[in-house]
Image (tube, coloured by chain):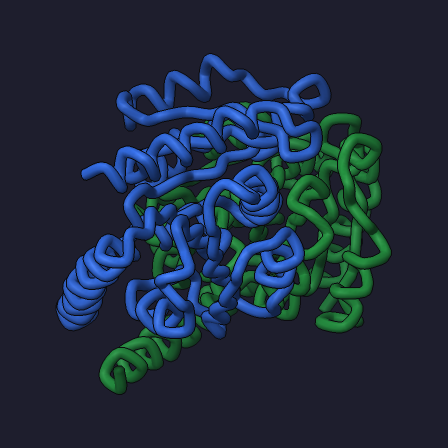
Chain colours: A blue, B green
Amino acid sequence: MTQRIEVLEDIFKANNSQALLNCSRLEKAGIFSLNLMASPGAGKTSLIEQTILGLKGKTRVAVIDGDIATSMDADRAEKAGATAVQINTGGECHLDAFMIRNALDRLDLSAIDILLIENVGNLVCPSAFRLGAHQNVLVASTPEGHDKPYKYPGMYQGVDVLIINKIDLLPYINFDMQFFAQGVEILNPRIRTFLTSCSTGEGIQSWIDWILHQKKSFSAV
Amino acid sequence: MTQRIEVLEDIFKANNSQALLNCSRLEKAGIFSLNLMASPGAGKTSLIEQTILGLKGKTRVAVIDGDIATSMDADRAEKAGATAVQINTGGECHLDAFMIRNALDRLDLSAIDILLIENVGNLVCPSAFRLGAHQNVLVASTPEGHDKPYKYPGMYQGVDVLIINKIDLLPYINFDMQFFAQGVEILNPRIRTFLTSCSTGEGIQSWIDWILHQKKSFSAV
């Protein structure tokens, strides 16, 4: 058991060092970056599509798409109008900073203003691996249920932004928003929250405005 | 990198040996067991509640509940009428055979006919860790989207049974059942499938009947 812990510690340490290098590389290139994490099927890819469409003509967007298999998500991002790079983790349950370094090597950083990183769908493992993105974003979806903050505290604690997606399904499901919000408040009182539906478009504009504002503040520093 | 792979191989080997011991221990006690896996929020706990209620008076059910944190799921299983043991993995993204061994130590095996194991909500990691259960069950839910078999092939390949849950939401979402089924067919043509809604109760009886039939065939061997 001791050996396993030591090996894991080495992995986290090496990952964190690489994450810092990624962050500095992105900053030098003037790229504002977001790491989007979620359960499988919470709507990360749909949100990225809506984000690309909302930012079209305003700023240049690229996407790094992480998945166990297929290039379905990168294809969708490209179709929506962004430059996209697919990472297939080949079974790994999360992205890590080294995968991001390799993906950055495949992008023309001088042609990008905003980088969206779509992590592997997983509410546990991605929270332990920093990638070097400026903000960590969790996409929750209402059909997942109102108990998720309590049951996946590591993820809810470690992010800067929470998007509560699929709010168009609220009339058809049993989702207690107050109980959910209470759990989030205990774990992460300073979190920035957006309510969205990628089907109806509700809330997407506020999210786009926030990204543009962040990018502006970031560039002004 | 080599060292990491060696350590992981040791972990898998040790886990598989313990899984075989668990399986043999369950068989000696005449207990038929299911390992339920799913994304966070697919409805594992609701399905377990419905299963306990459906089996009430017919057979004696126990539940081992795996979660990162809280005892919310075990509480729900107990309230529905089963004996329940909670495992808090303390951050680990899946159950393993050693956790199950420890949980079995806490149960009176002579008082159980059917054991339901609720794994941590995760479509990646639990598929790599056998627990010693007789059947591996994946609970998918329609709001997760029809692309999930393609994107999480390891999980869809490695299970015996697929439950497609939350079918009551089909009228309100974009879910192409044919595309989904095609993905499942490619990966796992012999899988046994059930369509259920834990909200309306649709399909639950077939699932209960199947469990009772499996238990009977199992005991007759």
**Quadrant, the C terminus of chain B:** bottom right
Depth check: give the residue in front, B82 or A14: A14
Residue B103 picture location, percent across and down: 38, 50
Q: Is residue B152 left or right of residue A31?
A: right
Depth check: give the residue in front, B73 or A83: A83
Q: Is residue B203 left or right of residue A203?
A: right
Q: Can you say whether A3 is above or below A189 in the image? A: below
**Quadrant, the N terminus of chain B:** bottom left
Q: Residue furthest front?
A: A57
Name the residue rendered at 38%, 46% in the picture.
A34
Name the residue rendered at 51%, 16% in the picture.
A177
Q: Can you say whether B173 is above or below B190 in the image? A: above
Depth check: give the residue in front, B24 or B9: B9
Asked if one can make out residue A104 in the rendered structure from this viewpoint, the answer is: yes
Q: What is the quadrant of residue B50 in the picture?
A: top right
Asked if one can make out residue B104 in the rendered structure from this viewpoint, the answer is: no
Depth check: give the residue in front, B176 or B117: B176
Name the residue rendered at 56%, 44% in the picture.
A56
Residue B180 picture location, percent across and down: 77, 57
Residue A29 picture location, percent across and down: 28, 58
Q: Is residue A2 left or right of residue A118?
A: left
Q: Residue furthest top?
A: A178
Name the residue rendered at 64%, 56% in the picture.
A76
Residue B178 picture location, percent across and down: 86, 56
How many numbered dots are placed on residues in this image? Answer: 0
